[in-house]
Image (tube, rainbow, N blue to C red):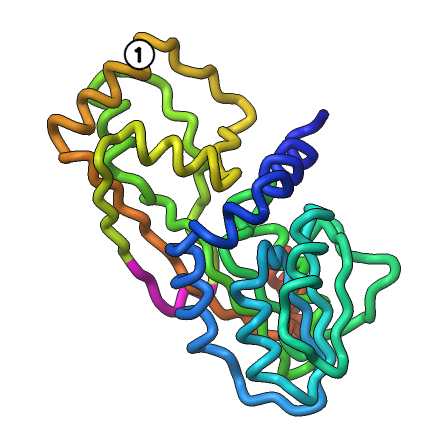
Amino acid sequence: MNRKQKISQSFGRRAVYYSQEATLQKTVAKNLANFLPALHQADILEIGCGTGFLTTRLIKSYPDCHLLVSDLSENMVSFTKENSPHHPSIDFKILDGEKLGKGLPNQFDLIITSMTLQWFTAPGETLKKLQHFLKPGGILLYSTLAPDCFPEWRQTLKDLSYPCGLITVDPLPGEISHDTFCVSHKSALEFFRQLKNLGTSTPDPIYNSLTPGQFRKALEHINQHYNAQMSWHITYGQLPFLTQAESLEQAGFPLTTAS
């Protein structure tokens, strides 16, 4: 089973729990929706719908648009389809957001994804590819974990000289806003149990796991030095449609003007 399949399975088998307990992800979807443009009779693609936190807001915001709602997990797509409000023009599809292509409309007025990019193999490259699926004047909106998310855990591992298995997302283009959510837990162990129950605990693919003894020592360090608090740093971004010339320049082929 490859990493994408593990992520899909991990999220999919916890869809009901995710829908009930992923309160922070629900808040991030709400905040991302604040940047939605005014659109009418437009084509909209959502990537990584999860259990429908953002989908519900798209349905309410765009009653006369066509929505294509997708996720890598079949269970997540099924859950969202069954639990979303009615919309006159909506399709649900199992899609890998990094491999869009056959079977899709060529262009969208809006592509949007919330808390999904951190699971991609190459988030920055994927954003560039997604820009090519926009219509002229279209926009791409996203929210994702910032590079410095969970600083308490990162610092703990650094203090103890342990390897860090957190997924690292490099700074992405188009940042328009950011949030920090400081979440207190009864213990650090509760935080990690919550991640596991939400299906969000798949580590970096090259990570060598901590031994049970190392993990216990790291948990004790967080409880002692940070009172079991974890900080989620979230980035929101917006990117435009790219002309062919802009695509070439972005790829490192600057256009020259004949003299």
Where does residue 113 sit, x and y in percent of width and height? 57, 61
Any magenta on residue 177?
yes
Observer-nearest of 131 and 89 = 89
Any magenta on residue 46?
no
248 horizontally vs 160: left or right: right
Where does residue 194 sit, x and y in percent of width and height? 40, 37
Where does residue 228 sit, x and y in percent of width and height? 20, 35
For label 1, the crowd category at 10 Å Cα-Cα, with few meaning under 14, some 14 to 19 and many 20 or more, is some
Q: Residue at left 54%, top 51%?
A: 117
Q: Residue at left 57%, top 82%?
A: 60
79 versus 169 height, above or below: below
Residue bearing the label numbered 1: 214
Tell me the quarter of the image containing the C terminus: bottom right
Q: Magenta span covers which residues?
A: 174-179
Observer-nearest of 203 and 206 = 203
- Disc 1 is placed on an element classified as helix
80 versus 146 height, above or below: below
Residue 98 visible, this angle = no
Q: Residue at left 30%, top 27%?
A: 189
218 horizontally vs 117: left or right: left
Q: Residue at left 39%, top 31%?
A: 193
Residue 59 visible, this angle = yes
108 horizontally vs 167: left or right: right
Q: Is the magenta stretch mostly helix, strand or loop?
A: strand
